[in-house]
Image: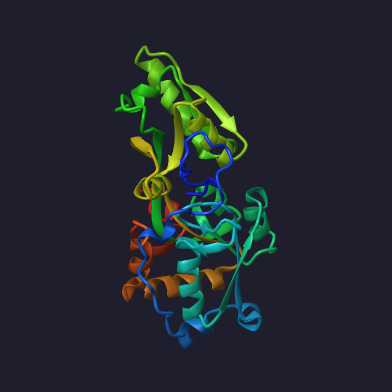
Amino acid sequence: MRRALTPLLTCTALLVAGCGGGDPVAADKPRPSVKAPAVDPALQAMLPAAVRQAGTLDVGTTLPNVPYLLTDSANNITGGITPDVGRAVAAKLGLKYSIKNVAWEALLPGVAGGRYMMADDGISDTPERQKVGIFVDYMQSSSVLVTAKANSGAKSQDAACGNGIATIRGTTDVDTAKKISADCTAKGKPPVRVTQYPTAQDADLALRSGREKFEINVAETAEYAIRKGSPIAIVARGYVPAYVGMYVGSKQTELAKALLGALTALKKDGTLDTILGGYGSKSITPGINLATAKGGAA
């Protein structure tokens, strides 16, 4: 569920504004190592000729986005769901794997316009995005309402009534926060002050500094941060459930089918579950455009 997010409150000092870009405790529990899958000639033959000729799965993504993309202090990608799954898929298809950091605003239009072969970044499958691209979904996600752990009195979303919620401009966060505000007023409680920040770092800082008491976050991002010792708490769950997957241009049906074949094979032999399990997530049976194929998000 792409929101261009960083891990919340992972700095040692809560009020330090200049948090590093990396995952400071990523090595505290090694993730399962996954042997590169063998090439499947039948799946390789499904690839478009241009992709086979290029020999590389060219992927666009946007940093940072834990746990989809883990980085070190120099912002080099060190792991994450996106590259770990992507490399396994590329190996299955007999391709090399290349990942590029692209501004979020340019990522999906770049795929639609043929500038990037594929985007893979915890991107939510939506009917709107399906108009210009194809999703090959392999997991699910949703949003959560979080607060600083020190705000221990917050036991439900009602605690946000009359307080501020940090959101990221141009994302589903804003709609979620507005819905929470509407729920507050429907119960006769004061509305939420919804503030839209330009980046995840800005929204996170607003929560860290106490400027905002709540923030909308991606479930797996918040859960990963909490496992790493982040002093935050999840107040409410289940907002904007969505399928998540790889995203290719609308004309790349051959590539989508080849990616689906590779992901299905990796699901069958347990590789996909091993990779996602290492990040505390679960896979689903892979499919094409599941947001509409199954009548909407699960």
* 59 with respect to 286 (left or right): right
| Residue located 59% across and 33% down the image | 197
Asked whether residue 174 appears in the rendered view, the answer is no
| Residue furthest front as drawn | 13
**Foreground of the two, 102 or 142:** 102
Q: Residue furthest bottom?
A: 41
Taking the view exactly as shown, the residue that stands out farthest to the top is 188
Figure check: 296 above or below 259? above
- Examine the image and state in which quarter residue 219 appears: top left
Q: Position of residue 117 (x, y in %)?
A: 63, 67
Position of 120 relative to 298 (above/below) = below
The quarter holding residue 147 reads top left
Count of picture labels: 0
Residue 158, horizontal then vertical, whole percent = 34, 22
Q: Is residue 198 above or below residue 260?
A: above
> In the shown orientation, is residue 272 left or right of residue 91?
left
Q: Which residue occupies 29% across, 28% down? A: 155
Q: How is the image coloured?
A: rainbow
Note whether residue 144 is visible. Answer: yes
Give residue 273's position: percent from left, percent from top: 33, 66
Which residue sits at x=35%, y=61%? 29
- Closer to the camera in the image, 210 or 269: 210
Q: Is residue 44 left or right of residue 62?
A: left
Vertical relation: 51 (above or below) 287: below
Residue 248: % across, % down: 57, 63
Identified at 45% across, 36% down, the residue is 216
